[in-house]
Image (cartoon, helix red, strand yellow):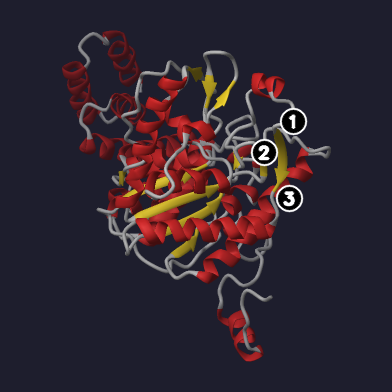
Amino acid sequence: MAIEVISGKEAMKFLKENKNSRYPTPQINKERLFPFPKPESIPGFSINENSKVFTMGSCFAREIDKVLVVNGFDVTSRSSTLSKVAERTGADESLYNKYTIHSIVNELRWALDPAHPYDPERALVRISEDNWTDPQLGGNVFASSYESMCKFRASYCDSISRAKNADVIIITLGLVEAWYDKQSELYLNLPPHPRALTRFPNRFELRVLDYNEILSKLDELHSIIERFCKPSVKILITVSPVPLEATFRNQDVLIANTYSKAVQRAAVEQFIYQHDNIDYFPSFECVALGNPNHNWSGDYRHVNPHVVRLIMGTVMSKYTQAEDCQKNLISSEIDFLYQKKQYSEIIRRFEINPPADLTLSATYRTGLSYKHLGKIKKAFVIFEHCLQLDECYKPALQNALSAAAKLGLLEKFNKLLADHEKHYPDDFEFRKVKQSQILSS
């Protein structure tokens, strides 16, 4: 069945009028791919800057959380008051990682639907006489007594229930290699504990999800949200760009990962066409189409934080007109480009957007870009602007002093020197060096 039917006349019209209908080439629209891919989605709704946002999904969702908090959004999935009764290691935020569509649906159903509460007798797995694990959780696996795990689980479900008050729910899909517990008839979030596999060798199996299974669970997810969350709630969904760390299948992980991302992306495309309150945002495309040396943090798996900020800055700037989002988007681009030493591109962006549209760190890095390219006069002007934003910002103050010394701007140098002594009285060695520089200029 076709997900969309377009008349021949309309299809030719789209080809002609859609400015993004043709794939970029080195000669035409190459800036849509380099230095950072810019796939454009069309928002189907708007988001108020005061909206409550709840995120759920793979580890990429936690990175999204962080960026949204910086952009001033009320991210209710970030706050946590989890019970300390069960000892564990690692950050609690990783416990919220949900890697498959089944584990996302499980958690929302247990937290929101009174007719289907979390059942510890069904969900917990015994690995020794006095220790139980919960394979529905993310993060570092931990075990504790049955009573402790039950108490912990109550607080965990309570924190997930915050989704019912969200104005926007952001879902990130991760994996299709899903472990299944044949005894409880539940899909797990993580592979079974090694002791569980030893204790119950025939209880668990790996299932590789297909298109129909994923789409069916997406529809179930929408039904739960529709029944128990705000009537006006909007859903943003994406496929996580983070690849498989390893595959349990007898095939190359590169092939297994391609199937995993492709089948989820295809199911999501059908899903969004079925519902009016759902939009897709292209985080997977932003990373997969880009330069691996730019997009990854060094392990080829986790997305560079600068890139996450760019992705979410782009998304939120489309859905809300909040000035902070626009400023953070432009600033994130400059921070990303500076990390990659693309100084000329930074200057081009800066000259398009006035300094008022940038954060302090992005403004400072623009000044450094001018400095790296030998444009000391322009660098000095930018460093001065940084000091208007924060008069005691030490990196800008010291670079402004250095630039003034090189340019022989004695009056400005003396003022900056006095400011430096005022804010950093113990750093007299730096001032001594700069004084000798201006005397020799």
Please give the residue where the numbered disc 1 appears in the rendered image. Answer: 202
Vertical position of residue 215 compared to residue 402: above or below: below
Q: Position of residue 58 (x, y in %)?
A: 53, 41
Numbered disc 2: secondary structure:
loop
CB under 8 Å between discs 1 and 2: yes
- Can residue 369 be seen from the camera position used here? yes
In percent of the image, x 41 and y 30: which residue is there?
153
CB under 8 Å between discs 3 and 2: no
Vertical position of residue 173 compared to residue 416: above or below: below
> Which corner quadrant holds the C terminus?
top left
Q: Position of residue 285 (x, y in %)?
A: 60, 54
> Which corner quadrant holds the N terminus?
bottom right
User: Which residue occupies the foreground of this view, 48 or 161?
Assistant: 161
Q: How many marks?
A: 3
Q: Earlier in the sequence, mark 1 or mark 2?
A: 2
Q: Earlier in the sequence, mark 3 or mark 2?
A: 2
